[in-house]
Image (tube, rainbow, N blue to C red):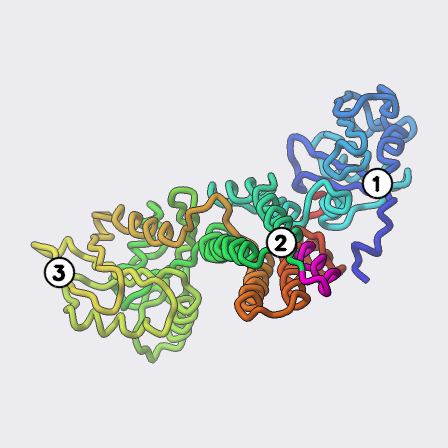
Amino acid sequence: MSNYLRTDLDDTICALATAGGVGAIGVIRVSGVNAIKIVSSVFKGKNLENVDTHTVHLGKISDDETVIDEVLATVFISPRSYTGENSIEISCHGSPYIQHKILELLVQKGARLAKPGEFTLRAFLNKKLDLSQAEAVADLIASNSAEAHKTAMNQMRGGFSEQINLLKEKLVNFASLIELELDFSEEDVEFASKEELKKLVTNIQSLIHSLILSFKYGNAIRNGIPTVIAGKPNAGKSTLLNALLNEERAIVSEIAGTTRDTIEEVLTIDGINFRLTDTAGLRKSMDTIESIGIERTQDKISKATIVLYLFDASTTSEQELNDELKTFEIHDAIIIPVGNKIDLLTHLPNHQIIRSSNQPVYISSLRKENIHAIVDVLQKVILEQKVNSDIIITNIRHYESLKNTAISLDAVLNAIDQKLSGDLLAFDIRKAIYHLSEITGDITTEDLLDNIFSKFCIGK
């Protein structure tokens, strides 16, 4: 059985809700049926058992006559709290010693230390959040860009859940009518119009496919977009990395093969993180260390979403460039050719590219000329992945459930076209409802909950 569901949910739990270490303040969260009673037993000030919900009180946390700290206690009375239980948040000074002593005292008085994600698990079990909203809490905490924050906030507020529940409701209504027909099968009556059902399922399929397509973009903004800077030695890859970041991050040298290992940094463009990787130059090398670096370059390219292929615009012919780009055809990445060293030219070349859908961008990484053009192209290729929807899928679990829903709905349409029996039709509709219910948590398993909430930080 799951560690989480084995837990006695009648326990009162406590944990540090703020990051560990020294700070101005720390917040200790307490939740459970006896939360207010336990904190009141160590709180000197107003009697917290007689105060209104959502009120804040100044007092001292004391162990008998020993004062540990002067604190603010914020009281939330069930069901008007994050977890749906009686809860108190203790704002104390940010000394690790003080935080530890208060937690130790709460445990002595009958609370126990919370497991990772246990506060949010209780919020889910008490129907304060559905499962997709609970997962969005973790995404919100981990968000490190404007787009990731926006997507997590929309999901946590229930935008995605509302849409899924609406689809489920429509399917449930039709499934009920079809099953009602089965009870009157001998009377040959039709409660559910098959044409209306086909129209409904077709419309739902369109929305489901839109959500599925959004995952590529959503996964990118959640985790950052793997972007590799590749090319031959001395093409100017490290100089380009420094120019994009506007700092001297990588060592630059005229000696070929200077970069022997990958260097990773993050470039944020309009709220989206691009995980830039500077790599070793692509060539055959007898140097053991450099060869390892080249192998790592090939590995990074195989996992990249975007490859900025840097070539020397002053020496590379059109045929050479197309031959070099041919080596990338086995990869699924978006290839952006970048002609560097235009400062050595009197006029821009005109390489006609047949190995990439993107024509070259010409720059001088040394003089930082036209670097904005690379930023513009990066922004463009990602926006082309974005679907025209406010709801974007970022979670692989939701993505898999939506794909299974689409398969079940395809079976429904096939059953209608082949005029199959009502019981087979109802079965396929119920399967679609089941997969949609997996997303919101109406249907869960112990292992699923364990897997989701164990990844949360303690105190959340």
Query: Where does the magenta region start and end?
Result: 175-188
Mark 1 or mark 3: which is in front? Answer: 3
Vertical position of residue 460 compared to residue 325: above or below: above
Q: Is residue 338 left or right of residue 290?
A: left
The answer to whether residue 223 of the structure is visible from this angle is no
- Quadrant of res 410: bottom right
Local secondary structure at mark 3: loop
The amino acid beneath tag 2 is: Leu
Question: Residue at 30% across / 74% down in the picture?
Answer: 327
Question: Residue at 67% across / 31% down in the picture?
Answer: 25
- Quadrant of res 60: top right
Which residue position holds label 1?
Answer: 104
Q: Is residue 110 left or right of residue 26?
A: right
Q: Is residue 141 left or right of residue 182?
A: left
Question: Nearest the camera: 105 or 306?
Answer: 306
Which residue position holds label 2?
Answer: 171
Quadrant occupied by the C terminus = top right
